[in-house]
Amino acid sequence: MNLVNQLIVFVIQFLPKRLVKRFAMRYIAGEKLDDAIRVMKFLNLKNIMGTLDGLGENVSMKEESLLATQAGEEVLHSINENHLNANLSIKLTQFGLKIDEEFCYSNVRSLLGIARRYNNFVRIDMEDSPTTSATLKLYERLRSEGYENVGVVIQANMRRSEGDIQRLISMKANARLCKGAYMEPEAIAFKSREEIQLNYLKLLKMLFDAKCYVGIATHDDFLVSGTYQYIQEMNLQKADYEFQMLYGVKIKLRDQIVADGHRLRIYVPFGKHWYAYSIRRFKENPQIARYVINALFSRD
């Protein structure tokens, strides 16, 4: 983290909540599901797909997880009722992963059942390293039980990810590949930007070679360019992949990818936990804070 990014993160933590909200709402749809639906309708009009995420994670009580499950069900119902081109993203620690893995599994399975009735899809987000193995284990269990409408996430900064992908390609997993936002020790994670970029492209090629459907989640011009090259060299079809970006981040790049004829999905978070989420994300990935601040003073 360079000195400018350190300063940005330090200052943001001491700003009044109302001012932080001004920053945060550049990349969060709002506090209510209706806000997310409104944003999603707008994106669909621009030929952009979406994934909706009701904010929250690391809950400590089953009651909270049951409420999150109910909220996830409402998201799926609303997507269907509004005829949106969107799906649902979830974090397993919001659904009880750290409380009881079987309880978490039951909650996620209920969401997948609803999504399947609507011919829709649920993406299981990846969280910090202590949850990686349990997340993949739950995903593999769901797939073994016939749930095809579920995907997972692999983080390119993690040293273990190549081995994880070897497991996933055997089941033709639908995988979102991202750089990884969590602060992890060097023993288990690559730290330099170049290392992460090169590993990202290596993992992406592995997934493409295995003919897995890939969500290419990045705002990095270098990685977008590298992906374009793979797509051309491997003669990939538009239905084989999609690009994915965060709501409100690098809008010009987003629109260029769409203009170039590629499928693109925007990750649209919403909910009352926006403040804790925002501060945590700024700490974990101060580059996002830089993007947001730049966006505040740009015509985008």
Image (cartoon, rainbow, N blue to C red):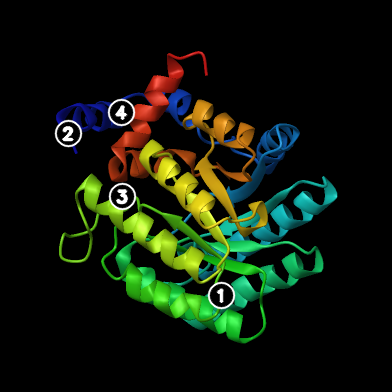
Foreground tag (1 vs 2): 1
> Which comes sooner in the sequence, label 3 or label 1?
1
Residue 2 is tagged as 2
> Which comes sooner in the sequence, label 1 or label 2?
2
Residue 197 is tagged as 3
Image position of 9 with respect to 211: above or below? above
- Residue tagged 1: 172
Quarter of image, res 3: top left
Badge count: 4
Residue 66 is tagged as none
Measured from the top left, where is residue 237 in percent x and y? 64, 55
- Residue tagged 4: 12
- Of helix, strand and loop, which one carries label 2? loop
Can I make out residue 92 in this image? no
Q: Depth check: 255 or 32 in front?
A: 255
Foreground tag (4 vs 3): 3
Image position of 17 with respect to 266: above or below? above
Q: Amino acid at mark 4?
A: Ile
> Which comes sooner in the sequence, label 1 or label 4?
4
**Residue sitting at x 50%, y 34%:** 27
Mark 1 → mark 2, Cα distance in angstroms: 39 Å
Mark 2 → mark 4, Cα distance in angstroms: 16 Å
Mark 3 → mark 2, Cα distance in angstroms: 18 Å
Mark 1 → mark 4, Cα distance in angstroms: 42 Å
